[in-house]
Image (cartoon, helix red, strand yellow):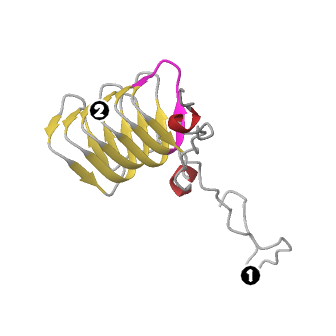
Amino acid sequence: MFGNKKPQGKELSMAAPAQAPVRMAPAEDHATKAPKNYISAGTVIEGNIISHEDLRMDGTIKGDIKTTGCLILGKDSNVEGNILAAEAEVAGLITGTVESKGSLTIRATCKIFGDIITRSLNVESGSSFNGRCKVGGEADNRPAARPAAAVSAPAAAPVAAMAKPKA
């Protein structure tokens, strides 16, 4: 129709066969990745949370959080309990131990009152932390340190042997 007539029959094409475009997987950014589980601001949970998926929390929890996925705590989050996650990005208030099997990112708005255990740690300026910190996987595989041998003075001769009898 309208003068764009194509010839009837087979067309021969000399072009190379088209290959499917190769798509590279985008680098994961936890801030833009939508987690499957979400606890909104204003929500208060009293009890433990166990999840096998990523979890984003902007509310309050009075209990422990355990996830095999990524945990994202927003700036308005409040956790009174221990945290165990494959990876974590925290920006709220935490009172308890924070353990991440992979990387732990502490945002500028985060305040942690408790210990940190992680393989990799990123800390933004402005955050605060009050507790002990253990970073790196090789620390777990190191043999226990042996106490240094005490250096002692040479044994002194018994006092009785040194005393001279009076005549």
Along the horizontal axis of the image, is 76 left or right of 2?
left
The stretch in magenta equals 119-129
Q: Residue at x 82, y 78 (%)?
A: 12
Classify mark 2: helix, strand or loop: loop
State yes or no: residue 121 in magenta.
yes
Classify mark 1: helix, strand or loop: loop
Q: Quadrant of the N terminus?
A: bottom right
> Of all residues shown, which one is farthest toward the bottom?
9
**Contact? badges 2 and 1 (CB < 8 Å):** no
Q: Residue at x 52, y 53 (%)?
A: 144
Q: Residues within 10 Å of mark 2 (few under 14, many from 20)?
A: many
> Residue 110's spot in the image, x, y percent?
40, 25
> Residue 30's spot in the image, x, y percent?
47, 42
Q: Residue at x 24, y 32 (%)?
A: 59
Q: Residue at x 32, y 58 (%)?
A: 52
Residue wearing tag 2: 58
Residue wearing tag 1: 9
State yes or no: residue 101 in magenta.
no
Total number of numbered discs in the rendering: 2
Residue 111, above or below 116: above
Q: For this rendering, which residue is in front, 17 or 51?
A: 51
**Hey, which quadrant is residue 81 in on the image?**
top left
Amino acid tagged 1: Gly
> Of all residues shown, which one is farthest toward the top?
126
Amino acid tagged 2: Asp
Whether residue 31 is visible to the viewer of this picture, yes or no, is: no
Q: For this rendering, which residue is in front, 85 or 139?
A: 139
Q: Quadrant of the C terminus?
A: top right
* Label located before the other in sequence (2 or 1): 1
Whether residue 165 is visible to the viewer of this picture, yes or no, is: yes
Along the horizontal axis of the image, is 35 left or right of 51?
right
